[in-house]
């Protein structure tokens, strides 16, 4: 059906001649944009609905008293469906620590939450295909779990700012009761919020893709930052860390890099570094973490991303 | 009536504050609206998802940017 639309749009509405490069580019654009927008609306809505049943307050209860390693996996997975607004990072962190969620488990959540979410998944799926999207999610989870386990093993509880332990968390706020209709309304509005924010970036990403698809790719980056350059991943991560963007903002750049011949491992490492570690996030986390723990966090996650980058370049 | 908006000053928190102010105008009601950014105060309410709406010490919503309509409902509900 989407192909039909793209055919109609390109050949009938715009009357572009078949076989020309510009036609190809337009056709690609007319097919990809509706496809991604559709995916975006459906999946974001589904996740938003799911989320109305699992508020953060409930998550911490689930994570409090179980087997540690299982909790790391659980925390990282829950990180996927939790939208991460940097403004919630501190209250979540304090809330987790206060209710007895182990530090390592808390970190699994903190790592996964900004790096993997349904929006990143949809965009990667739409622009790079299902394989890349699943790889990204799988590897992101792995990094979050392993980083959390390592930080848990290091027993760095004393490097959490002291006041955190002194804060008295009030009794869990009364669940604001939602009817089924409320949930649908709230989820639908969330879709609108996300859509308005993401839609322009998708258009930019697809436009870059369409342009490169239609016109011959020049493997500019492949020459300088290809598989043969052992420093490429390191450089990509070093550039990515100070940059701050959510998944939707970085995708057009990622699309361009990849299309210009940057290997997949390097590209994904760059994306993870941008979304998973960022300057504003560190400044905010510094308010609850002493420098040593903050540095450990950056080090462990950064190292994980590097390994992933090299591994993918080597395997794929 | 004392209305508090809990959050660390992010865009979504401002969105909630806007909705609340609009709702108050619609209702022709005068109330004190305070943005609470102090973490200790926020945590005392036991909420973890920002932004949250608190009226007269009671948490009415968390993690959501209410529309002016919904904010209106919450305010009316709290005044009874």
Image: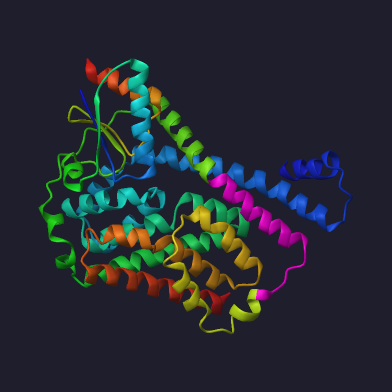
Report if residue B21 lies within the magenta region.
no
Q: Quadrant of residue B10?
A: top left
Q: In the figure, is residue A232 to the left or right of B71?
A: right
Relative to A197, A287 lies left or right: left
Q: In which quarter of the image is the N terminus of chain B?
A: top left
The quadrant of the image that shows the C terminus of chain B is: top left
Q: Which residue is drawn at 38% across and 58% down?
A: A112
The reply to whether residue A73 is visible in this rendering is no
In this view of the protein, which residue sits in the foreground, A268 or B54? Answer: B54
- State which quadrant residue A127 falls in: bottom right
In this figure, what is the number of numbered marks? 0
The answer to whether any part of residue A63 appears in the image is yes
Residue A184 drawn at (x, y percent): 45, 30
User: In this rendering, is residue A79 above or below B22?
Assistant: below
Q: Position of residue A146 (x, y in %)?
A: 34, 69
Q: What stretch is highlighted in magenta?
A: A198-220
Q: In this view, does A230 lie above or below A104?
A: below
Task: Please state which of residues A45 and A287 is positioned toward the viewer in this rendering.
Answer: A287
Q: What residue is at 65 percent from the left and 66 percent from the top?
A: A259
Give residue B33's quadrant in the image: top left
Q: How far from the left and from the top, in percent, is residue B45? A: 18, 39
Residue shown at 31% from the left, 39% from the top? B51
Q: Is residue A275 above or below residue A169?
A: below
Q: In this view, does B75 lie to the left or right of A190?
A: left
Q: Does the magenta stretch include residue A207?
A: yes
Q: Nearer the viewer, residue B26 or A281?
A: B26
Q: Which residue is drawn at 39% across and 48% down?
A: A83
Q: Where is residue A185 in the image (x, y as percent from the top left)?
A: 44, 29
- Residue in front for this viewpoint, A132 or B10: B10
Horizontal placement of B22 versus A90: left or right? right
Farthest-out residue, right = A17
Eyeballing the image, is A315 above or below A206? below
């Amino acid at each position: 059906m989407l192909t039909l639309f793209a055919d109609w749009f390109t050949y009938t509405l715009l009357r572009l001649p078949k076989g020309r490069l510009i036609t190809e580019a337009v056709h690609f654009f007319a097919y990809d944009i509706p496809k991604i927008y559709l995916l975006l609306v459906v999946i974001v809505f589904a996740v938003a609905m799911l989320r109305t049943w699992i508020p953060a307050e409930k998550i911490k209860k689930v994570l409090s008293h179980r087997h540690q390693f299982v909790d790391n996996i659980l925390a990282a997975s829950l990180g996927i469906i939790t939208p991460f607004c940097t403004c919630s990072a501190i209250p979540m962190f304090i809330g987790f620590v206060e209710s007895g969620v182990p530090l390592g488990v808390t970190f699994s959540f903190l790592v996964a939450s900004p790096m993997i979410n349904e929006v990143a998944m949809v965009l990667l799926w739409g622009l790079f295909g299902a394989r890349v999207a699943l790889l990204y999610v799988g590897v992101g989870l792995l990094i979050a779990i392993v980083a959390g386990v390592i930080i848990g093993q290091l027993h760095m509880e004393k490097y959490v700012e002291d006041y955190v332990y002194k804060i008295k968390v009030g009794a869990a706020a009364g669940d604001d009761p939602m009817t089924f209709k409320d949930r649908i309304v709230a989820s639908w509005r969330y879709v609108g919020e996300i859509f308005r924010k993401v839609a322009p970036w998708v258009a930019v990403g697809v436009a870059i893709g369409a342009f490169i698809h239609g016109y011959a790719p020049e493997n500019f980056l492949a020459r300088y930052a290809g598989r043969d350059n052992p420093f490429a991943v390191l450089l990509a991560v070093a550039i990515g860390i100070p940059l701050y963007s959510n998944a939707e903002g970085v995708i057009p750049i990622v699309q361009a890099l990849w299309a210009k011949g940057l290997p997949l491992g390097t590209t994904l490492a760059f994306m993870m570094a941008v979304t998973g570690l960022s300057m504003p996030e560190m400044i905010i986390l510094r308010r609850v973490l002493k420098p040593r723990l903050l540095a450990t966090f950056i080090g462990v996650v950064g190292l994980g991303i590097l390994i992933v980058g090299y591994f993918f370049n080597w395997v794929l | 009536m004392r209305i508090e908006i809990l959050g660390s000053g992010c865009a979504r928190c401002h969105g909630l504050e806007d909705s609340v102010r609009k709702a108050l105008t619609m209702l022709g009601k005068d109330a004190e609206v305070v943005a609470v950014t102090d973490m200790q105060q926020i945590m005392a309410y036991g909420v973890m998802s920002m932004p949250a709406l608190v009226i007269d010490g009671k948490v009415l919503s968390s993690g959501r940017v209410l529309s002016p309509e919904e904010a209106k409902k919450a305010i009316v509900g709290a005044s009874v």
